[in-house]
Image: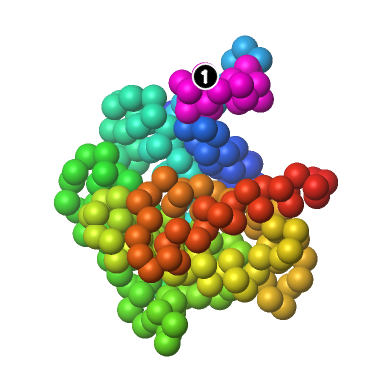
């Protein structure tokens, strides 16, 4: 039965779901490797990402869309996170249910909920159908998701950066996720090169000597969530093969620098 949560309650639930989705692969890797990482290996009963993640993903399946007229980026990344949980826990039924939740968006009745391109907060929507394509191999998902990734680079600037570039730190999850998902779905290296080129430009523009990032060049403040966006984007891209030019391998060197700075900043 659909949840009656709305507004801030839904946003809170979706944010927690996204966090669980991010923690689950890290926790599984730590446990399987035998690494001595107590904070990722020993959880109170019922509190591990393996337990909490599927519960949140199931809650997401039954939750209504948010109050916005089109799908909000927080819902998009939660959809992606829930699909990642399904893949990591080998829950085919969860994948099926998440695909069913998406199906009305492909039909006239709810087509108006699909965001338009042209802004990073809208374009990241393409990551959800791309992840559905990776899971199901249904071509309609690839067509929809790849369209967002390609339109994001329809009008690149002289440096090869997306026309959606704002140099806001949150872009480093929005743009990275979409382009990396397009690479995973197609194995076309142009998507990986785009993500890497964009990320290096943001690293050079926004990262400070302590490793953290300003929100934007004209907003010289350390924003906890924004630094989290950057860390998530770098983590999402880091397992992928690096390519020439060296821009594609620059971001992993900066991740420890970022984490070290974050450890020194309260909250």
Residue in the foreground of this view, choosing between 162 and 137:
162
Residue at the image position 45 percent from the left and 58 percent from the top: 249
Residue at the image position 52 percent from the left and 26 percent from the top: 30
User: Is residue 206 something that shows in the picture?
Assistant: yes
Viewport quadrant of the N terminus: top left
The answer to if 73 sits in the magenta stretch is no
Q: Is residue 262 left or right of residue 56?
A: right
Q: Secondary structure at mark 1?
A: loop
Q: Is residue 192 left or right of residue 267?
A: left
Residue at the image position 33 percent from the left and 25 percent from the top: 90
On screen, residue 97 above or below 128: above
Query: What residue would you read off at disc 1?
Result: 34
Magenta region, residue range: 27-43
Residue in the foreground of this view, choosing between 176 and 76:
176
Where residue 221 appears, as percent x and y from the top left, is: 77, 66
Could you tell me what secondary structure mostly forms the magenta stretch? helix
């Amino acid at each position: 039965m659909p949840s009656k949560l709305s507004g801030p309650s839904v946003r809170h639930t979706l944010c927690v779901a996204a966090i669980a989705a991010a923690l689950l692969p890290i926790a599984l890797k730590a446990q399987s490797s035998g690494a001595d990482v107590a904070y990722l290996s020993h959880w109170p009963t019922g509190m591990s990402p393996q337990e909490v993640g599927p519960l949140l993903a199931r809650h997401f399946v039954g939750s209504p869309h948010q109050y916005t007229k089109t799908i909000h980026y927080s819902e998009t990344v939660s959809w992606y996170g829930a699909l990642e949980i399904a893949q990591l826990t080998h829950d085919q039924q969860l994948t099926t249910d998440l695909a069913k939740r998406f199906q009305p968006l492909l039909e006239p009745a709810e087509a108006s909920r699909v965001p338009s391109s042209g802004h990073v907060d809208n374009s990241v929507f393409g990551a959800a159908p791309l992840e559905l394509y990776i899971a199901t191999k249904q071509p309609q998902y690839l067509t929809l998701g790849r369209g967002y990734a390609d339109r994001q680079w329809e009008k690149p600037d002289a440096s090869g950066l997306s026309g959606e570039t704002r140099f806001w730190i949150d872009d480093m999850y929005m743009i990275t996720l979409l382009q990396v998902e397009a690479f995973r779905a197609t194995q076309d290296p142009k998507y990986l090169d785009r993500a890497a080129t964009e990320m290096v430009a943001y690293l050079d523009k926004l990262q400070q000597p302590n490793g953290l990032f300003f929100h934007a060049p004209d907003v010289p403040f350390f924003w906890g969530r924004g630094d989290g966006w950057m860390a998530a984007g770098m983590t999402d891209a880091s397992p992928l093969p690096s390519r020439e030019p060296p821009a594609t391998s620059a971001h992993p060197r900066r991740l420890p620098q970022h984490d070290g700075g974050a450890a020194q900043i309260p909250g």
